[in-house]
Image (tube, rainbow, N blue to C red):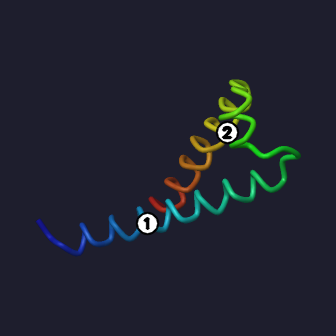
Amino acid sequence: MEWKYVLASAVFSLVGIFILGVCFWFFEKITPENLWKEIIEKNNVALAIVAGAFMIAMGIIIGSAIHS
C-alpha cells in the first residue's frame, strides 16, 4: 500500500466534506425558514427529504469533480 494514495484520499475527502458543508450552509441561508428548526421541532418530513436530496446531489457533484 502506498501512503501517498491514502493521504490524497483523506485530503480529498476532507475538502469534499468542507465544500458540502459550505453548500448546505448556503442552501439554508437562501431558504425562508430555519431548516433545522422546521425538521426537528415541527417534524417537517417533506423538508427533511428535500434537504437529504440536496446533500446527496451535492455529494455526487463534488465526488465527480474530485474524481476527474
Disc 2 residue type (three-letter)? Ala
Give x and y (percent) for residue 27.
Answer: 75, 52
- Cα gap from disc 1 to disc 2, whole angstroms: 21 Å
State the residue in front, 66 or 45.
45
Residue at the left extreme, as displayed: 1
How packed is label 1: few (under 14 Cα within 10 Å), some, or many (20 or more)?
Answer: few
What residue is drawn where x is 65% and y is 35%? Answer: 40
Residue 1 placement, left or right of 49? left
| Quadrant assignment, res 23 | bottom right
Q: Secondary structure at mark 1?
A: helix
Q: Which residue is mark 2?
A: 51
Against 39, residue 63 (above or below) is below
Against 20, residue 46 (above or below) is above
State the residue in front, 23 or 31.
31
Against 34, residue 15 (above or below) is below
Give x and y (percent) for residue 37.
Answer: 73, 41
Give x and y (percent) for residue 1.
Answer: 11, 65
State the residue in front, 62 or 38.
38
How packed is label 2: few (under 14 Cα within 10 Å), some, or many (20 or more)?
Answer: some
Q: Secondary structure at mark 2?
A: helix
What residue is drawn where x is 66% and y is 32%? Answer: 48
Disc 1 residue type (three-letter)? Leu
What residue is drawn where x is 43% and y is 66%? Answer: 14
Query: Which of disc 2 and disc 1 is earlier in sequence?
Result: 1
Mark identifier at residue 14:
1
What residue is drawn where x is 25% and y is 69%? Answer: 5
